[in-house]
Amino acid sequence: MTPAVLVAVLSLGQPDAAFRDGLDLRADAAVARPKFVEAAKGYDAAWQAGERTPAAATNRARAHALAGDLPGAIAAVHAGLRLAPYDADLLRDLDTLRDAVEYPQAVRPARPGGLRARVSPWDVLAFAALAAVLAGVGLARRFTTRDGWAVPLAAVGGVGLLIAAIAGWQLAREERREIDKPVLVVVRDTTPRKGNGDTYPGLTEWKLPRGGEVRELHRRGGWVQAELANGVVGWLPETAVIQP
Amino acid sequence: MPPLAILLLVLSPAAPRPSVNDLSPVDRQRDDFYGAMSGGGKVTAAWALSSDKPPIGSDLTLTLTVTNAANPHELSRPPLADRDDFRKLFAAIEDIPGPTPPPDAAKVEFRYKVRPRAEGAFRLPELKYLYYAQAAPPDRRFQTAFVVGVPFTVTKPPVSKSPVVPLDGPPQFFQVRNGSIFPPSGKPTAGWWAGLLGGAAVLTAGWVVGWRVWYPDAARLARIRRTRAVRVALDRLRAAARSPDPTAATAAAFRRYLHDRFGLPYSATTPAEVAAGLSELNLPPDRIAEAEELLRDCDAVRFAAAGDAPVSPDEAVRLIEQWEGVAT
């Protein structure tokens, strides 16, 4: 365990304590909000130090949201989903946070889909283990007592292993797609432009709202080429986006 | 001035208004140039703040006024939100959109909503504002109008007398989520997969080897269960020992074995018919004799007076093992 992680683990109670203080004071938003700001900073530090779990990501996102930092909350959810894309709490929080973003029409991203949002790699491993047990028992009985059900059981196990292999391949494929086009979160209302400079005309008549999500394609000269949820590609200043 | 000259002056076409589109793309992309063209005089620019003593946390309107540009409708807004010196001073910088000025406007105003970061005395950063003077010598056509910084003081926030407002949000956001071990985060490494498949293969092989070592008789039986006919016959003979009439069951199981394994016609049921059928199949005579003797013993027990000892299914099992070449 590195010293940074050790420090983060030892101080893990602090952001939780600040969060709970904020909950106790929620009757007055002006008093509660600074507590959530403090909690968000603590969760950020722990996350940077390597304390990364779906629960930590959830609490981090909620602290940012209650502190009034909508883009930070959405970025924290995405950081957690990169770790556990199937996590139901994170997916639900992402939906809720997106409701707070004033998206223009057809630019709101779809709910994360695919196999990754439904199945954990550990689920696939557990399924493969069960299939391997069935195949192993079937083969063992086939070569020992030669029971009539041995071969069908081994066949069921083999099919299970094949399904597990296909699922693993699909998960890896979806993860690669996610890595190739990482999510960026817009921190202020920004007009996507046709080129990487302020002198280029705007791509749309509306601005991308604060908290909006785009997919990064390239970076050049302090600008990011990004794909919107409706497939339109434009350029945004690097200062206008954060990466989860 | 003579009347003719005045007439010519009035009738002569007006000089075209300079446009930023007359410049080359390289000139248009120059740093700190926002499209201002001079029609002859100097272009000037100035800051104005809506308040010089704003309280911390309040929003101010910052106005940049550009005057004497020959193409006011073509000017672009300086992106203050992308400048480090402004971001250091203000926590929030947002553009306030305004109408496009007419081509003959004397001045253009760009408004921004800004929120100071901290209390104290500050000065707005100086802005370098380039404009293009077409009438100047070619090497001095880009001229600079410095926008002089304006001092302002951010004061303490006013004492709030606003009513207490509870913090609102989705119910689930007001809960601390506790960590759980399952499902573990991340994903299984290649070692997990190799361990799973390798472990399953090793356990299966170990099971087979161990079973053969610990149960040699069972292993021998397993070898003769290679064919379905043998497997069925052995299962029936095992069941025959528990049946009400073990002898009849043994005879039936043995006959079924002969039918399935050697193709003996189903019409051959008596010991003599079975022996004849097996002879036609060119089986060794000693085997045929043994099979006929077993079936005769069965018939003898079945049709004899009560009290005779039944024929054991083990005798049929022994014959099958012998015939299948695995007898000890």
Image: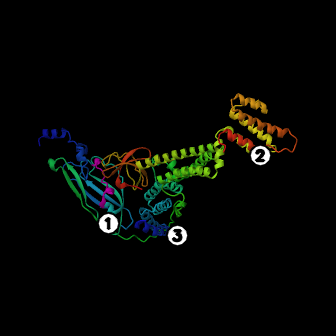
Q: x and y percent of residue B79 in the render?
A: 31, 54
Would residue B4 be counted in the magenta stretch?
A: no
**Residue labelled with disc 1:** B52
Q: Given the image, on which type of amino acid does mark 2 rest?
A: Ala
Q: Given the image, on which type of amino acid does mark 1 rest?
A: Asp
Q: Decide: few, some or many residues near mark 3? Use Cα within 10 Å; few <14, some 14-19, many ≥20.
A: few
**Viewer-proximal residue, B95 or B3?**
B95
Q: x and y percent of residue A2 in the render?
A: 41, 65
Alpha carbon separation for disc pair 1 and 3:
38 Å
Quadrant position of the N terminus of chain A in the picture: bottom left
B70 relative to B85, above or below: above
Secondary structure under the numbered disc 2 in the rendered image: loop
Q: Is residue A235 left or right of residue A59?
A: left
**Residue labelled with disc 3:** A24
Q: Given the image, on which type of amino acid does mark 3 rest?
A: Asp
**Residue labelled with disc 2:** B241
A20 relative to B190, above or below: below
First in sequence, mark 2 or 1: give its number.
Answer: 1
Marked residue chain, label 3: A
Mark 3 and mark 1 in contact (Cβ < 8 Å)? no
Q: Which mark is residue B203?
A: none
Q: Bounds of the magenta span?
A: B72-85
Secondary structure under the numbered disc 1 in the rendered image: loop
